[in-house]
Image (cartoon, rainbow, N blue to C red):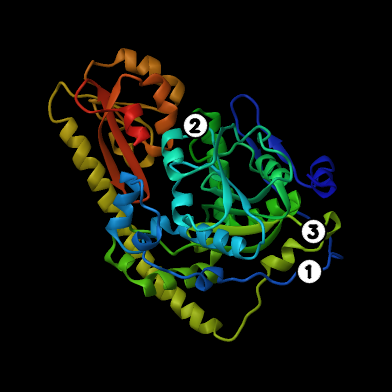
Amino acid sequence: MGDYGRKRLIGGRFPLIFERQGRINCDLARSHPDPNLSPMPSPSRFPFLRFPLVPFSESVTRTPEDPLLEEHLLRTRFSVRMLRYWWVAQAIRKEAKNRDTPLTIIDLGSGRGWLKRFVGEDIDAKWIAIDWNPETKLLERAGYDEIIQANFDHPLPVEANSADVVSSLHVFEHLPRPAFSLVQIEEILAPGGCLLAGTPTMPHILANWRQEIFRKRLAEGKILRGGHINSLSTRRWYSLLHDCGLRPEFITGSHMIRHTGNPLENLRPWIRFNQIWAGLFPSLGSEACLLARKPVAEDDSDGWSRETLVKTKRRPGFAIAIVLSVIALAVAAFLFLTNTSEAEARVDKILTTQLATDEDHLLIIHHPLLSAYEKHVQATIIHSIDEIPKALADLPEGTHVVFHEDHLTALIPTAGDYVVDSRIDVDDDDFYLIRKGTDGTPLKEFLSK
């Protein structure tokens, strides 16, 4: 890390609020940019419109096959849920085109290795997957050169100044200390290297309010480790990047709203409309998407002011944008309400079937979409991974366990004898239903597919 980053941390330019007794080590970064700093050019508000949009099933590496990815690729031509991999892949391809030497790409929070499949095989790069619980077989099949297990709340086990690209998709909202982890990324990036990141987002005021709720629920033991414990507005991202010495080239939104399987996701104009909306109103763009670069020279990192970047000027067509936003909000509200009711109905249908007889029982790891079962006589709700072993021991033999995808890998150590009954796909969230028994796919085998 350069002297700039050290001065920011050691000098206390942003407070790291360490909460004890089970609370999150939560950094609420606040920047105070020097008014004398020279501004850098304003970043693009619509970077994604410059990327080619080809049906994902035609552009993604599908051999060897990943059944879960296939499900998304075949459902619609332009799955909005997959846009996070698409834009990062396009940015990586552009980065490779502008360099004469092979890239070293670190996929931080690599999951099933879908990012590499979106990038393809025709760029010269070394791929390193880093995950807290890497799915080694899947990552090897996807073609990663190196796979590393790491805790993102510790220094990353990668040589300093060695990475040309670090991708981190939907990771920071799960981290106990986002600023600490961002400093570690700045450390491993080579000068001129870039961070490509994406997280859920919302307006700053709402994000701060939600952050306080996260902290309270975590202190009460009502949020599981690995769940969503941070709320990151675009404004907070600017603050974090400024304080950690990275220069944003863009911070924008991804899309207006996601409704998986919607026929509109087959239409290229619908995707472009979503991207225009997200560029006009990044805080309402559902996901914050950013590209930030490590300065080549250390004294160049002070060359921008966050407030300069955050400010936007009114331009011709502003009135048109307002009209479009009103129309878009109406469409978004309709899709959101429709999708929410469908998601709840899907979950309820499957779980009701499981509770059709007196012998069936559910152990439910808490999630808002499952809150209707809080007082169900045949269901037991738990709020912490630590409660699972005792809960399993106290429940009937035929108990089914229902949990959100975020907690899948955290459950493995205590559920070695469990098999997967079904996966419940509810658009933004996937749930799993598992139980003890011999009929069904073993949980660990299911994860390796």
> Local crowd at mark 2 within 10 Å, few (<14), some, or many (≥20)?
some
x 61%, y 83%: residue: 315
Q: Position of residue 393 (x, y in %)?
A: 33, 13
Real-space Cα separation, disc 2 to disc 3, in angstroms = 38 Å
* Viewer-closest of 107 and 396: 107
Q: Is residue 32 left or right of residue 108?
A: right
For residue 90, above or below residue 386: below
Q: Do we see residue 241 in this rendering?
A: yes
x 82%, y 60%: residue: 300
Q: For residue 424, what is the image quadrant?
A: top left
Q: Does label 3 or label 1 sit earlier along the sequence?
A: 3
For residue 384, above or below residue 176: above
> Local crowd at mark 1 within 10 Å, few (<14), some, or many (≥20)?
some
Q: Does label 2 or label 3 sit earlier along the sequence?
A: 3
Q: Of the residues shown, which amino acid type is indicated by label 3?
A: Pro
Of badges 3 and 1, nearer the viewer stands: 1
Residue holding disc 2: 133
Q: Position of residue 324 (x, y in %)?
A: 44, 78
x 35%, y 27%: residue: 444
Real-space Cα separation, disc 2 to disc 1, in angstroms = 41 Å
Which mark identifies residue 97? none
Q: Position of residue 203 (x, y in %)?
A: 55, 58
For residue 82, above or below residue 127: below
Q: Of the residues shown, which amino acid type is indicated by label 1?
A: Pro
Residue holding disc 1: 39
Label 2: element kind: loop
Q: For residue 256, what is the image quadrant?
A: bottom left
Label 3: element kind: loop
What is the quadrant of the C terminus in the image?
top left
